Amino acid sequence: MTKVLGGIVLAACIILAASCGSKSTTDSESAPAPVLNADGATTNLPHLSGPPKYFLDRLGAVVIPSTAKAVPISSTDQVAGMGWAADGPAQLLAGGVDIVIDGKAYAAKYGAPRPDVAKFLKVPAYTACGFSFSFPAAAFEKGKHRLSVRVLNHDKTGYWESDTFPFECQ
């Protein structure tokens, strides 16, 4: 999905190449599911008005996830993704990125090189606006889930949140 804000096309990508699932079992016992800590920086910050400056390019195998009812995710994969985000109003790098799944915020790694974004948007400060994340699939139950991206403003005093994108653990 391409969002247009003030006549500027916003481009970014997230790749959720991943999945969710159930516990693996042996004949005599089942392994405990991994536990994810909801460690997102946005948990106690205010939601800022307006859309975030980001673009969701891919979710699982779906190239334009905004057109999918629910992206199927295999129970044997990791929930993983990558993309870019920035503090649009300040034209600076964001203060960080959280990935929100079913209302819980998880920290993404932020600061990966994205010279393509800086060049496209003509904002040199965006050169390192990439992010990535990876979560153990077994931490999520089978069924439908919703993912969104929270972009912290550069001074980490608030965040913008994207629309949600459905995925289904199978």
Image: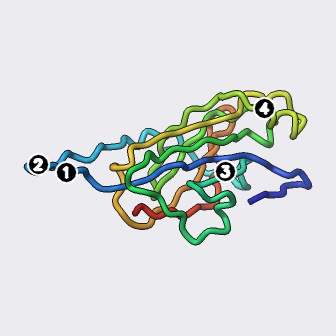
Residue at image coords 58%, 72%: 69
Using the image as rendered, state which of residue 165 and residue 71 is in the foreground.
71
Q: Label 1 sits on what residue type?
A: Thr
Query: CA gap, disc 3 to disc 1?
Result: 44 Å
The reply to whether dot 4 and dot 2 touch (C-beta < 8 Å) is: no
- Mark 3 or 1: the one toward you: 1
Q: Residues within 10 Å of mark 2 (few under 14, many from 20)?
A: few
What x and y, as percent, mark residue 20? 40, 54
Using the rendered view, name the quadrant where residue 85 is placed: top right
Provide the secondary structure element on which disc 2 rests: loop
- Mark before the other along the chain sequence, 3 or 1: 1
For residue 29, the mark is 2
Residue denoted by label 4: 126
Mark 1 lies on a secondary structure that is: loop
Q: Which residue is mark 1?
A: 25
User: Which badge, 4 or 3, is on the more N-terminal residue?
Assistant: 3
Given contact means CB atoms under 8 Å apart, are the residues at marks 3 and 1 in contact?
A: no
**From the viewer's perspective, is residue 44 above or below residue 112?**
below
Residue 143 vs residue 86: left or right?
Answer: left
